Image: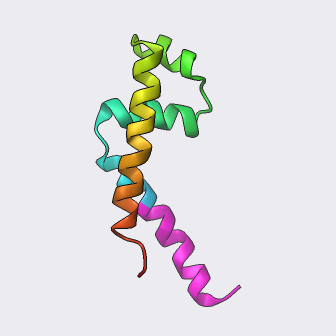
Amino acid sequence: MSSRRNWTRPNRHEQLEHAIRKLPDHQRVPLVLFHFEEASYQDIANTLGVSLGKVKTDIHRGRAALRRLLSDHAPR
């Protein structure tokens, strides 16, 4: 593995964490619960006291926002 690759992996991880912290709570919380805690959509809806549709929408919009935030830091 090249030294450049070793350097960029932690950097990507840091960029992801930074981007996740920038998301509004209503997107960040369900996205983290789904992807990192492996909670189901229904479990997230029950935990947060919101509808299943809201959870799906917030995760979808959170992913889109992350893509935008991370593309701003992507090498060109």
Quarter holding residue 25:
top left
Image quarter hosting the C terminus = bottom left
Image coordinates of residue 44 in percent, x first then y, are 50, 20
Give the left or right position of residue 3, taking residue 65 as reference.
Answer: right
Say which residue appears at 56% left-offset and 16% top-offset: 43
The way the protein has been coloured in the rendering is rainbow
Number of callouts: 0
Nearer the observer, 12 or 75: 75
Q: Hey, which quadrant is residue 50 in on the image?
A: top left
Q: Is residue 18 left or right of residue 43?
A: left
Q: Position of residue 73 (x, y in %)?
A: 37, 70
The vertical placement of 66 against 28, above or below, is below
Residue interval drawn in magenta: 1-15
Q: Is residue 39 part of the magenta span, yes or no?
A: no
Q: Residue at x 55, y 22 (%)?
A: 41
- x, y percent for residue 13: 50, 62
Q: Is residue 42 above or below residue 11?
A: above
User: Which residue is outermost to the bottom?
Assistant: 3
Q: Quadrant of residue 63?
A: top left
Whether residue 13 is visible here, answered yes or no, is yes
Q: Is residue 63 above or below residue 17?
A: above
Q: Main secondary structure of the magenta part?
A: helix
Q: Nearer the viewer, residue 33 or 71?
A: 71
